[in-house]
Amino acid sequence: MTNFDRKSHWENIYSTKSLEEVSWHQPIPTTSLQFFTKNNIPLDAKIIDIGGGDSFLVDNLLELGYTNLSVLDISAAAIERAKVRLNENASKVTWIVSDITQFKPEVSYDFWHDRAVFHFLTEETEIEQYRTLVADAVVSNGTLAVGTFSENGPLKCSGIEIKRYSIVELTTCFESNFEPVEKFQINHDTPFGTVQHFTFVRFKKK
Ligand SMILES: C[S@@+](CC[C@H](N)C(=O)[O-])C[C@H]1O[C@@H](n2cnc3c(N)ncnc32)[C@H](O)[C@@H]1O
């Protein structure tokens, strides 16, 4: 899929579907939130949510008192939806409209969160590019938390073919620069009653 097609796809999704019409929606992103709450991530940590879309993670992190939040997404429509929802709190967040494969970070991050975005990269060149990007962008001892569809999860996400990862495969993918510290698999109940099996790994930058 070319970058142009990819962007059009996501702009179309966020311009035509409501929150409950997309499989990834979570009213409370419990799994992602526990990465912050259980590990005492400081409130001033520089956090980026990759492909955050209009996820409620940023709302919840603001609520918890986090002060240094960025959300990146390929879709300007998704970012606009999140901004409208957050209203005056939107100005507390750095919003970045970019394809992750084109992203050139201007700062380093203490916490890089990616739920169901990395798995859209199916070509080895783009996977390698992402690995280099995250290794350069996350500070020493910083956190990388990635969630993808598992080896038993769906073959497609939002109608696009994805790459599924077992715990071992996801761990292996990043372990040259990151030490795995937490690994698990979990079922996500979609708003329309289906189940998607996810692999999550939390890493610490070496
Ligand atoms: C399956 S949704 C997950 C949204 C969010 N992370 C969540 O867990 O609710 C995938 C998101 O990644 C974004 N996305 C897909 N490909 C991307 C890319 N190459 N660069 C940046 N964002 C991308 C989409 O616009 C969408 O918001």
Image (cartoon, rainbow, N blue to C red):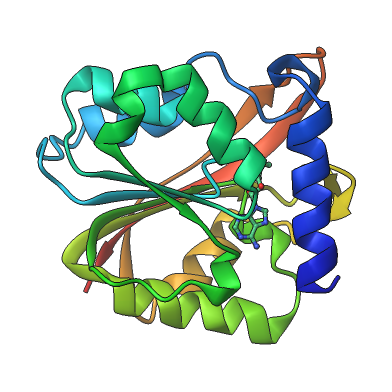
Residue 162 appears in the picture as rendered: no
Q: Quadrant of residue 22?
A: top right
Judge by depth and name the residue closer to the eye, 13 or 148.
13
In the rendered image, the residue lying farthest to the right is: 159
Q: Quadrant of residue 125?
A: bottom right
Q: Position of residue 66 (x, y in %)?
A: 18, 32
Q: Is residue 125 left or right of residue 28?
A: right
Residue 112 appears in the picture as rendered: yes
Residue shown at 68% from the left, 30% from the top: 24
Q: Quadrant of residue 194?
A: top right
Residue shown at 67% from the left, 58% from the top: 119
In the rendered image, the residue lying farthest to the bottom is: 125
Tally the numbered discs.
0
Q: Is residue 68 left or right of residue 169?
A: left
The C terminus appears in which quarter of the rendering?
bottom left
Q: Position of residue 128 (x, y in %)?
A: 57, 83
The N terminus appears in which quarter of the rendering?
bottom right
Q: Relative to 59, say whether 10 is above or below.
A: below
Judge by depth and name the residue closer to the eye, 200 or 76.
76
Q: Relative to 103, say whether 112 is above or below.
A: above
Judge by depth and name the residue closer to the eye, 149 or 126.
126
Q: Position of residue 2 (x, y in %)?
A: 83, 74
Residue shown at 73% from the left, 56% from the top: 164
Judge by depth and name the residue closer to the eye, 133 or 2.
2
Q: Position of residue 188 (x, y in %)?
A: 65, 26
Residue shown at 35% from the left, 77% from the top: 135
Q: Is residue 46 left or right of residue 177?
A: left
